[in-house]
Image (cartoon, coloured by chain):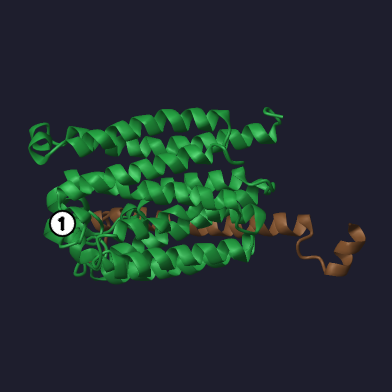
Amino acid sequence: MSLSKQHELHTRRYSRNVGVGLVLVGVIAIVFGLTVVKVTRGDYEPASTQTVTQ
Amino acid sequence: MTDTSINTQAHSHDTEAQFSDYFALLKPRVMTLVVFTAFVGLLAAPTPVHPFIGFCAILFIAIGGGASGALNMWWDADIDAVMKRTQRRPIPAGKVTGDEAFAIGIALSAFSVVFLGLASNWVAAGLLAFTIFFYVVIYTMWLKRWTPQNIVIGGAAGAFPPMIGWAVATGGISVESVLMFCLTFMWTPPHFWALALFMRKDYDNADVPMLTVTHGRRSTRIHILVYTVLLAVLAIGAGFTSIGGPIYLTVAVVLNVLFLRGAVQIWKRDEDMSEEDNFLVERKFFKLSLLYLFAHFGAILVEAGFDKFGVWA
C-alpha cells in the first residue's frame, strides 16, 4: 500500500531528522569558522615564518 | 515507500523518541551552570581569547558536560526509574534505550575533548576529559552507591568548568581558577543535602547512600550548617584575592549572611517542624543556593569586566 497521506510516525520522525540536520549544519559551520579564525591568525604557519612576521 | 518500511515494532507511538528526548539526555539544566561558570572562568582570565574561539570552547565544554550527563543516565537508569524526581528522564520513560544513551555519551565525550583541544589548547581539553572521567567513573560508577560522601567528592566534577574556561584562555591552572573551583566544590554539599531533606523518600527507595539515609536527618542538618560556615569563609575570603573586589565582596557578604541564616534555621528544626510546613525552610534554602552560585560567579564576571575596562584602576 502506498502512503498517500502523511503517517503520524512520519511527522514525529520529521522533527528528529530536522534536529539531526541542524546539528550537522552546526558542526560544519563551527569547523569552517574555526578554520578561518586559525588560518587568518597564522596559527598554522611554519615556526620560521612566524618568527619573521613577528 | 510502503507501510512496511515504518518500524512500528521498536517503539509504540507514545514512546517514540523525539529530538528533544535525546537533548534531555544531556541534562540541559545542569548544562546552564556549566556554561555560565565556564564563561566566567574564560572572561575572568587575564589573557584575551578570540570571540569565536571562546564561543566554540564554551560550546565544547557544554557538550562535554552533557555527554557525561548522558553516561550518568545510562549507568543510573535503574535508580532513576525508582526516584520520583528522575522517573521522567528519557531512559526510565522508555523513550531512549540505555545503549543509545551510552553511544551518544561516548561519541559526544570524544568529540568535545578533541574539538576543545584543537580549538584552544590541550590543557583545557585534558581538564575536560578528566571532568568527564571524574563524573562518570569516580562519582556515578563508584562513589554514588558506595559512600555518603558521594556528593562531597563528586561535587568536584561540577566545579571544574570555570577551571577549564580559565585554561582555555591561559593554557594553565592558577590560584584564581582553583578558588573558583573551590567555590562550587564547597557549595555542592549543602545544596544537595537540602534537596535530600525534602525529597526524602526518593533516595531511601533507590538505596542510594545519601547522608540522610546513612547518618540520619539530624546529622544531615548539622552537616549542612558546618559546610555552609566553611563555604562562607571561603566565599568571603575570595573577595580579598585577585578575582574579588568591592562588588564581589558586597554580593558575597549579603548572600552568605542569608545562606548562613538558612542553614541555622535548618539546623534548629526537627522533622516534625519540617513536616508541618512541608519543608518550607529547606526548599527556600535550596532555591537560595541556586541564586547564591549564580550571583557569586556573576559578581566575579562584573569584577573581571571592570578590571579590563580599568574602572578600579
| Image position of B278 with respect to A49: above or below | above
> Left or right: where does residue B103 sit relative to residue B64?
left
Observer-nearest of B248 and A6: B248
Observer-nearest of B186 and B23: B186
SS of the residue under disc 1: helix
**Residue at 30% across, 72% down:** B99
> Left or right: where does residue B52 sit relative to residue B19?
right
Observer-nearest of B292 and B265: B265
Q: Position of residue B305 (x, y in %)?
A: 63, 34
Image quadrant where residue B137 sits: bottom left
Q: Where is residue B236 in the image (x, y as percent from the top left)?
A: 48, 37
Chain colored brown: A
Image quadrant where residue B290 sits: top left
- The quadrant the C terminus of chain B occupies is top right
Q: Does residue B117 appear in the picture of this structure?
A: yes
- The quadrant the N terminus of chain B occupies is bottom left
- The residue that disc 1 covers is B213
Q: What amino acid does circle 1 point to? A: Val
Q: Where is residue B89 in the image (x, y as percent from the top left)?
A: 24, 55
Q: Does residue B1 appear in the picture of this structure?
A: no
- Crowding at mark 1 (Cα within 10 Å: few <14, some 14-19, many 20+): some
Chain colored green: B
**Residue at 23% across, 33% down:** B265
